[in-house]
Amino acid sequence: MEVFDSPDSAREYVGSFRSRGQTVGFVPTMGALHEGHLSLVHSARSCDVAVASIFVNPTQFGPTEDLEKYPRTLDADLEKLRTAGVSAVFVPTKEQMYPDGFSTWVESPRIGETLEGICRPGHFRGVATVVLKLFQALPATHAYFGKKDYQQWRVIEAMARDLNVGTEIIGCETVREADGLALSSRNRYLSENDRERALLLSAALNQVEKSYVSGEARTEILQIQMRELLLGQQPTATNTLSDASGTVPRLDTLDYATIVSAEDLTPLTSIDRPVVALIAGSIGTTRLIDNRELQRI
Ligand code: PAF
């Protein structure tokens, strides 16, 4: 497996396949790789060649967020990518991505202005900028993003379309632990007790899906149900996550629990098109997000 740190050598490598008419599948990451990332690599391997990048992008972290603390596990990550069948990895330094004098930004498309865009001002500007820069270094035919970061996937789709990037953006299903917890590099911050509470997110999504499948289509009602479960306001008897002492778990903060159009993330009164339920909240200092595309089976 080749490891490049300069954008020019990465571009030359990808170009050598593209000039022969071959497809190149790209998985951008910030490292701290888990099975979720490896499932993206698995999808990328349907192309003639799979490439990846590892770069903890400072411009997508807010001033009070966990940039310094973000897990950095480069050697283990490279080994995982090698074993998963990646042919080349781009691992730039901060100076290569943001040299002195850097001053050109990609503003977030409109779809990034709600939800995470409100909770994390500037986040999608940093994401859109770095992803466009990564696409310049690795001009792949296809790029793979996890739907766990649902809004991010939609932001990148819109950015690639609006700026004629020419790389097909593919959203891939979230990978979960057996008990439903969505895989995330940030899960490693959770204590055993906090990890139990983190299950509230998938439990709320299961519950909302069940209500929807049973016929409830009013988003206000479905959102109230999610919020009550996430904030420990449901009666203990109906809360399967309560412990033997009857303590009902709750998130420490809930940023949103909402149901919006899956296509453009706009709010709806009643479900009359494909929708996604999205949740963001914190347990201690760890911020967690999760979502579910609701289907009436
Ligand atoms: O999802 C991530 O890991 C990052 O936001 C991405 C897309 C690699 C951009 O830094």
Image (cartoon, helix red, strand yellow):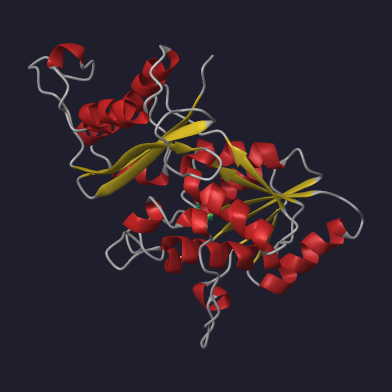
Question: For this view, does 165 lie left or right of residue 64?
Answer: right
Q: Which residue is more in the foreground, 52 or 118?
A: 118
Q: State the image coordinates of residue 206 (x, y, percent, origin top left).
A: 38, 21
Image quadrant containing the C terminus:
top right
Q: Where is residue 191 in the image (x, y as percent from the top left)?
A: 23, 38
Using the image as rendered, state which of residue 152 and residue 210 is in the foreground: 210
Residue 207 visible: yes
Residue 33 visible in rendering: no
148, 29: nearer the viewer: 148
Q: Is residue 184 above or below residue 247?
A: below
Q: Residue 172, relative to residue 264: is it above or below?
A: above
Which residue, as the protein is rendered here, is positioned at the far bottom?
101
**Residue 53, position in %: x, y?**
60, 57
At x 30%, y 68%, the residue is 63
Residue at the left extreme, as displayed: 245
Instruction: Tell me the residue at 50%/51% (across/down).
Output: 152
